[in-house]
Image: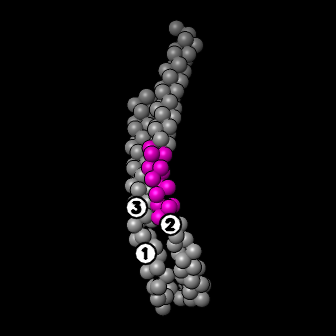
Amino acid sequence: MKILIWSVSLMLALLWTGAAWTAAVFARWSGQALVSGSAEAAGRAVAAWPVPPWLSLWVDSAWLKSAQDALRWSIDAAQGVLPGIGAAVGWLVPLVWVAWGFGLAMLVALAVLAHWGLSRGRAAAARATPV
């Protein structure tokens, strides 16, 4: 049972680390995209896409057109602020790793607690069993 506790804890730690790594890479990428202006260019390209005819079967074309107009307006409104936001995102990567460290510490603490509880429960059961 103890092996199961530590195996599950290891798997959860690996998943947690992968999620933190992915979040850190995404935060770094999005910050660089905002600073360089490529996010603005990508937003303008998306706003200029023509609505494909097959999509109108599921979504109203007028709604898609208004969503594209709203995206175009948002890009125009935030044009001067996006590089500043991208520079401020730089603190997000260390914050992700700090959260990862706290989460991993909690996971290890829970595994130790489960290990200790299992040992204590078995010892109590052994004392309660008459010989």
The one of 118 and 36 positioned closer to us in this rendering: 36
Residue 71 rendering spot, x and y as whole percentages: 55, 77
Residue 42, label in figure: 1
> In what quadrant of the picture does the N terminus appear?
top left
Instruction: Tell me the crowding category of disc 1: few under 14, some 14 to 19, or many 20 or more residues within 10 angstroms, Cα based.
Output: few
Give above or below for 42 relative to 116.
below
Nearer-N-terminus badge (2/1)? 1
Instruction: Tell me the crowding category of disc 3: few under 14, some 14 to 19, or many 20 or more residues within 10 angstroms, Cα based.
Output: some
In the picture of the structure, the residue carrying the numbered disc 3 is: 32
At label 3, the amino acid type is Gln
Residue 82, label in figure: 2
Q: How is the image coloured?
A: one colour
Mark 2 or 1: in front is 2
Q: Is residue 19 visible?
A: no
Task: Label 1, secondary structure: give it.
Answer: helix
Q: CA distance from mark 2 to mark 3?
A: 11 Å
Rendered image quadrant of residue 60: bottom right
Give above or below for 57 relative to 17.
below
Q: Are marks 2 and 1 in contact (CB under 8 Å)?
A: no
Q: Which residues are magenta?
A: 83-97
Q: CA distance from mark 2 to mark 1?
A: 13 Å
Residue sitting at 42 percent across and 41 percent down?
Answer: 13
Rendered image quadrant of residue 27: bottom left
Residue 115 rendering spot, x and y as whole percentages: 48, 26
Task: Label 3, secondary structure: give it.
Answer: helix
Residue sitting at 54 percent across and 21 percent down?
Answer: 121
Q: Is residue 89 magenta?
A: yes
The one of 110 and 32 positioned closer to us in this rendering: 32
Q: CA distance from mark 1 to mark 3?
A: 13 Å
Residue 33, label in figure: none
Give above or below for 18 relative to 77.
above
